[in-house]
Amino acid sequence: MSSYIAKPSEIERKWYVIDAEGKTLGRICTEAAMILRGKRKPTYTPFLDCGDYVIIVNAEKVQVTGKKATDKIYKHHSLYPGGLKEISFEKLQAKDPEEIIRHAVKGMMPKGPLGRQMYKKLKVYAGPDHKHAAQKPEVLDI
């Protein structure tokens, strides 16, 4: 008996909305990554993008546990000498709350072209409104 392998033409994509208000960052992002990869579907195929679209709203109200709010540091480098930039969780949440969720989900996706293709199906919004009502997304409780 051979394993089932989905064909790209057979893949059906749904849209899901996750409300991040009062939820823990890691819990939301792991669930979003699983949906983006398609691991919740019985037709999951590791080498194909068979995941669904995920919309995360209220990103500004996401929470972290412990002292991460003050101690967690996000770093990136400009590739110039002395170009290391650091920003704390609190400051990044005030400046660009969507980037916190994008950064966490991107780290959970596979590395390479397939992971980048899956990651493009993530839509993050700081407030409660989103512009994807025409797709009729399902509300997902976590």
Image: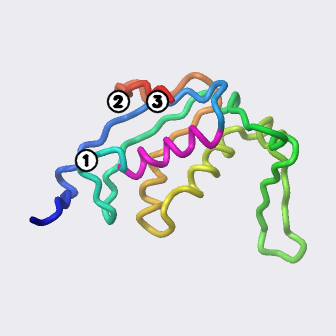
Crowd around label 2: few <14 · some 14–19 · many ≥20 (10 Å)? few
Q: CA distance from mark 3 to mark 2?
A: 11 Å
Q: CA distance from mark 1 to mark 2?
A: 23 Å
Counting residues from the start of the chain, the first of labels 1 and 2 encountered is 1
Pointer 3 with pointer 1, Cβ within 8 A = no
Q: Which of the two residues, 71 or 123, is positioned nearer the viewer here?
A: 71
Q: In the rendered structure, which amino acid carries the disc numbered 1?
A: Pro
The spot of residue 133 in percent (x, y) is 41, 24
The residue at the point 31 percent across, 52 percent down is 50
Left-right relation of 38 to 12: right
- Look at the image and say whether residue 48 sits in the magenta stretch: no
Q: Quadrant of residue 117?
A: bottom left
Q: Quadrant of residue 58?
A: top right
Q: Which residue is mark 3?
A: 17
The spot of residue 49 in percent (x, y) is 34, 57
Q: In the rendered structure, which amino acid carries the disc numbered 3?
A: Val
Report the span colored magenta: 25-38
Q: Nearer the viewer, mark 1 or mark 2?
A: 1
Q: Which residue is mark 1?
A: 42
Secondary-structure class at tag 3: strand
Counting residues from the start of the chain, the first of labels 3 and 2 encountered is 3
Query: Farthest residue in the bottom direction?
Result: 81
Secondary-structure class at tag 2: helix
Q: Nearer the viewer, mark 3 or mark 2?
A: 3
Query: Farthest residue in the front direction?
Result: 1
Secondary-structure class at tag 1: loop
Q: In the rendered structure, which amino acid carries the disc numbered 2?
A: Gln
The residue at the point 57 percent across, 38 percent down is 28
**Figure quadrant of the N terminus:** bottom left
The residue at the point 25 percent across, 47 percent down is 42
Q: CA distance from mark 3 to mark 1?
A: 21 Å
